[in-house]
Image: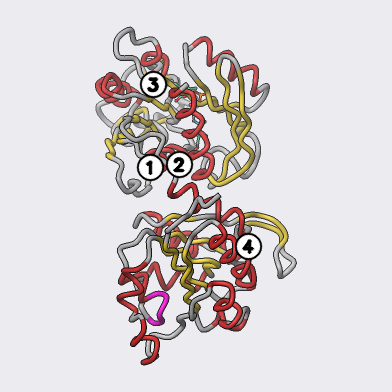
Amino acid sequence: MQTLAGKKILLGIGGGIAAYKCADLTRRLIERGAEVQVVMTKAAKEFITPLTMQAVSGKPVSDSLLDPAAEASMGHIELAKWADLILIAPATADLIARIASGMGNDLLTTLVLASDAPIAVSPAMNQQMYRNQATQENIATLQRRGMHIWGPASGEQACGDIGPGRMLEPMQLVEECEQFWADKPLKGLSVLITAGPTRESIDPVRYISNHSSGKMGFALAQAAVQLGASTNLVAGPVSLDTPVGANRIDVASALEMYNTVMQYAPSHDIFISCAAVADYRPESIAEQKIKKKDGNEHMTITMVKNPDIVASVANMTDARPYTVGFAAETQDVAHYARSKLSNKNLDMICANDVSIEGQGFNSNNNAVTLYWKEGEQSLTLASKQKIAQQILMCIAEKISS
Ligand code: PMT
C-alpha cells in the first residue's frame, strides 16, 4: 500500500556503519510512494557509495555545499524547502553534536538550519558513546527543539559491545515515517498529566520526597502533543525542559498538586496521574529551621495522609475525564495494580516494576503492563518516549470504542 504517497523525504546519511542499511531504507520508502532525496556527509561516503544511493533513490546524491553543478540544479536552500521531512539516519554522535550546537559546516547540517520541515533523528553509535553525558545532553537539546528521536535499538553492536546504540532497522524507520503522517488520534481532545515527585516540607530548609525524575510524565506530555492533544502538564519539582507544545504548571507539594488538578480536571477529556505523590506529609511545618538538640538521639515527625489525587478525579460525578493511574510496585505487580484499578475507580492503570534496574524511577527506559477492567496489554522495555506513545495509543483506542 502506498502509505507514504507523495511525501518528500530528505534522507541525511551520517558516517556510521549502519549507513549500509540506507539503501534498503530508501528502497522501502520509495515502495510506499515516497520521493527520497539523499544527502550524505563526507564520512558517510566511506560506508556506502553515492552511486549506490543514486541508483536506489533514482536521484543524484547531494554531498557538497560548494558544488557549483549541484547548486545550479537544486540549490541547498531549494532542497531545504523541498522536504516534507528530514530523516537523519544514521545520526552519529558527532553529527548530533554538530546539529545541537547549530553548526552548518557541511551540506546536511546547513540544510537542518535552513529548513522548517520536521526533523527526525535516528541515533546510531557505540553504546558508551550513546550513554555519554554529552551525547545525552545533545539528544535532549534536539528533543527540546521539537526534533523527533527515533531509536536507538539495543543489542549487539558492530564493535562487539552490547547495549543501546543500534540504528533502528529500515522497516522500523518506515513505520516511524508512516506513524508520523498517520491521523492524530487525540486531535480535538485535552489531556492533563501529572509528573515528577512532590516535596513535603518539614521546615523552611528540609522536605520529604522521592526519586521520581519526571521523565515518564514528561514523555507522556510530549507524546500527547504529538498525537494532537491540547496538553496541560502539572509538574512537581524536576529539572526537565517543558515538552514543546505542552502547557506546564509547576507545583511542589501534594496539596498544591491536588488543588491544581482538581481545578483543571473538569475541563479535560483524559487525566493521567504519573506523578509519584507523597502519601503522607508532616502534620505541621516548623516556621524556623529545626535545631539539633544535645541528647536527642531520635526525632519523631507526625505525618498525616495527603488526599489521593487520582482517586479524587476518578470519583468526580460531573465532567469526569477518562482517568489513568500508574502503579509503582516492587512485588506482586499484577495483583497490586488490579487492586488500585478497582479501589481508586480508574479506567486504566499502568503498572511498572520499579525494583528492576534500568527501568522505572529516574531511568530513560521503562516497561509497563496496562490493565483495564476487561483486559491487559504488556509494553516491553523501551525508551520512555516509546512507552508513552504506546500508552496514549491504547487510551485513544479505548475512548474511541
Ligand atoms: O518520574 P520518573 O523518574 O520517570 O519515574 C516514573 C515513575 C516510576 C514515577 C512512574 O512510572 C510511576 O510509576 N508513577 C506513579 C508513582 C506512584 O506514586 O505510584 P503509587 O503506586 O504509589 O500510586 C498509585 C497512583 O496513585 C499513581 O497514579 C499516583 O500518581 C496516584 N497517587 C498516589 C498518591 C496520592 N496521594 N495521590 C495520587 O494521585
Residue located beneath label 4 in the image: 127
- Residue depth check, mark 2 versus mark 3: number of the one nearer the observer: 2
Mark 1 residue crowding within 10 angstroms, few (<14) / some (14–19) / many (20+): some
Check mark 2 vs ligand 1: CB closer than 8 Å? yes or no. Answer: yes
Q: Separation of disc 4 and disc 3 at Cα?
A: 41 Å
Of the image marks 2 and 3, the number of the one nearer the N terminus: 2
- Residue depth check, mark 4 versus mark 1: number of the one nearer the observer: 4
387 in relation to 336, above or below: below
Callout 4 secondary element: helix
Callout 2 secondary element: loop
396 in relation to 115, above or below: above
Mark 2: amino acid: Ser
**Horizontal side of residue 111 vs 61, given as left or right:** left
Q: Separation of disc 2 and disc 4 at Cα?
A: 23 Å
Residue 281 circle label = 3
124 in relation to 330, above or below: below
